[in-house]
Image: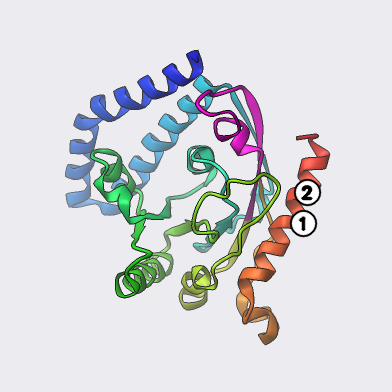
Amino acid sequence: MIRLILAVTYLFLFLILGIPVLLAEWLIGKRNPGLKARSSKAVVSWGFRCIAVFTGTKVIVRGRENIPIDTAALFVGNHRSYFDIVLTCPVFPNVTGYVAKAEMRKWPLLSSWMRNIHCLFLDRDNIKEGLKTILTGVEEVKSGTSICIFPEGTRNKVNDTFLPFHEGSFKIAEKGGVPVIPMTIVNSAAVFEDHLPWIRKTTVVIDFGEPIYLKELDKSVRKNLGTYVSGVISERYFQLKEEFNL
């Protein structure tokens, strides 16, 4: 109960007390948009690290060496918890926006921080608007900003299973000419979702797999990228689950 109260209270204070910082970021962006994105990413990452501390979550990161340093990338991960974003954002070495559901635009202050780090809002019920979002993602990666997406489309509510990966999720990498980085997240639901409404101390593993360059794949594989990448993440998931006894 104490961890839940601490996390909620901290998030509320972060958003309210961060209003002057948002204003400062807006002013920075008028002259230097790149600096605004980097400084906002640093502020958000710091805030998320604090939440991880308050919730007693230990994060173990594997495969940092697989993250390209000379190009943007499309990070593709399994999605089991609200904390997936909280725990992964501080791990990314550069500015990385998330593809979030369109409803998040209605959240005051939080949506402003999301825009600052180049998050995209996807309307899954409007095909035309959804296509525009994907095209915006293509432009983002071409300009050097990485994007993170959860191709299952929603939080999976069953442990140790994977929902089908939507093929359209990979268009950003295909059209943008950037590699796909499989991102395996293990045990994130143990923070909150496995025992709602309580938050409990736990360990979460985040593993970055070797880059997947789409042009190097056989045509048959490229036609079923969702299945292929889901298989890569699934295999790694169970390896890590056994290794860390989670």
Q: Is residue 10 above or below residue 113?
A: above
The disc placed on residue 238 is 2
Please report the residue visible at 48 percent of the width from the left and 38 percent of the height from the top: 86
Q: Position of residue 110 (x, y in %)?
A: 30, 39
Question: Is 219 left, or right, of 15 in this rendering?
Answer: right
The segment highlighted magenta reads 183-206
Judge whether residue 115 can be spotted in this image: no
Distance Cα–Cα, label 2 vs label 1: 6 Å
Residue 15 coordinates in the image, percent (x, y): 28, 30
Tell me the residue at 50%/39% (across/down).
90
Q: What is the three-letter code of the residue carrying label 1?
A: Glu
Q: Please provide percent x and percent y for residue 57.
A: 59, 27
The kind of secondary structure element at disc 1 is helix
Where disc 2 sits, the SS reads helix
Q: Position of residue 237 (x, y in %)?
A: 73, 49
Measuring 32% from the left and 48% from the top, which residue is drawn there? 104
Q: Is residue 17 above or below residue 132?
A: above
The quarter of the picture where residue 192 lies is top right
